[in-house]
């Protein structure tokens, strides 16, 4: 599922694409401000300022991809559950209103889909269990449509529009992946080990008898700042 010999991080001797430091931006870069954070974009690559330098980073959420993606290297996602009930969180953060509006609409649609489809018989229990754990840990979950395809590659999640355009999205709760990118971190919350990529927290889980890493939710605020490597 994950290599036991931890891969090199950007601060070590083995740089990784995401998180790798550069001391100067390439020519003809374009500035993008997203939710108050500065990004610099050139030729399909995003950078963020960090400590007098820049780090290569994942595209901000909601970014339509301007470059073609080889679908063969993308992984279509499986989900452990879909939310069919809208649930709120007491925490507020930059993305809160966006996630709240999205989750309300998706939960309403998923409720109709799940009610008519027997394959979701265990869905509500799984979703509720994940929500309770995420809320206990201070995480917020983003929902996914039960009748839409989602894709994953190197820590980035995508949805596909009817026209074939891919857009980066907030990693949806319940998404199952088989590997994490090199720049993941191991973190401890309430005495249990989890894995984090950017601000997304994963847990190990078994689904249909197979091991996966499951998106549990997103970390924000002071708790995230304890583990944040670059922003």
Image (cartoon, helix red, strand yellow):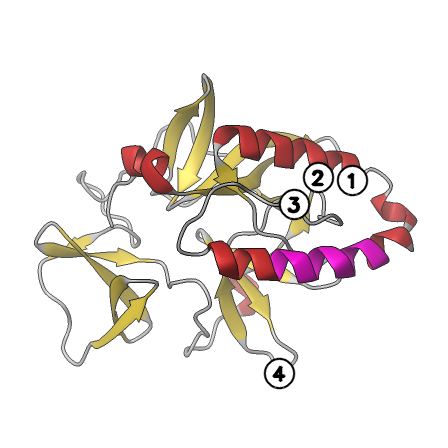
Q: Magenta region: which residues?
A: 102-112
Distance from label 2 to label 3 (Cα)? 11 Å
* Labels 4, 2: front one: 2
> Measuring 52% from the left and 52% from the top, which residue is drawn there?
171
Q: Would residue 114 be seen by someone viewing this image from the given angle?
A: yes
Q: Is residue 175 magenta?
A: no
Q: Residues within 10 Å of mark 2 (few under 14, many from 20)?
A: some
* Label 4 residue SS: loop
* Label 2 residue SS: helix
Q: Is residue 111 magenta?
A: yes
Q: Return the x and y of residue 116 as percentages of the image width and height.
A: 92, 55
- Disc with the residue nearer the chain's start (1 vs 3): 3
Q: Is residue 143 above or below residue 8?
A: below
* Label 3 residue SS: loop
Q: Return the x and y of residue 176 as percentages of the image width and height.
A: 61, 44
* Labels 3, 4: front one: 3
Q: Nearer the viewer, residue 47 or 110?
A: 110
Q: Residues within 10 Å of mark 1 (few under 14, many from 20)?
A: some
> Measuring 25% from the left and 41% from the top, which residue is drawn there?
229
For the residues bearing labels 2 and 1, Cβ distance under 8 angstroms: yes
Distance from label 1 to label 3 (Cα)? 12 Å
- Circle 4 residue: 163
- Circle 1 residue: 124
- Circle 3 residue: 87
Distance from label 1 to label 4 (Cα)? 32 Å
Distance from label 4 to label 2 (Cα)? 31 Å
- Circle 2 residue: 127
For the residues bearing labels 3 and 4, Cβ distance under 8 angstroms: no
């Amino acid at each position: 599922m994950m290599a036991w010999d931890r891969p090199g991080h950007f601060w070590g001797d083995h740089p990784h694409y995401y998180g790798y430091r550069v001391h100067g931006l390439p020519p003809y870069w374009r500035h993008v401000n997203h939710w108050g954070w500065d990004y610099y974009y050139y030729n399909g690559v995003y950078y963020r300022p960090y400590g007098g330098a820049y780090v290569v980073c994942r595209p901000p959420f909601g970014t339509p991809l301007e470059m073609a993606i080889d679908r063969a290297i993308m992984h279509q996602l499986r989900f452990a559950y879909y939310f069919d009930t809208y649930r709120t969180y007491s925490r507020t953060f930059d993305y809160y209103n966006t996630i709240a509006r999205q989750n309300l609409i998706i939960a309403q649609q998923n409720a109709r889909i799940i009610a008519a489809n027997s394959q979701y018989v265990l869905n509500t229990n799984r979703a509720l269990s994940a929500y309770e754990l995420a809320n206990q840990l201070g995480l917020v979950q983003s929902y996914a449509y039960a009748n839409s395809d989602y894709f994953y590659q190197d820590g980035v999640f995508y949805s596909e529009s009817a026209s074939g355009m891919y857009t980066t999205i907030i990693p949806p709760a319940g998404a199952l992946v088989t590997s994490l990118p090199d720049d993941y971190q191991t973190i401890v919350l309430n005495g249990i080990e989890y894995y984090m990529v950017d601000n997304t927290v994963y847990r190990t889980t078994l689904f249909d008898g197979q091991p996966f890493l499951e998106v549990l939710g997103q970390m924000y605020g002071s708790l995230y700042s304890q583990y944040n490597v670059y922003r």
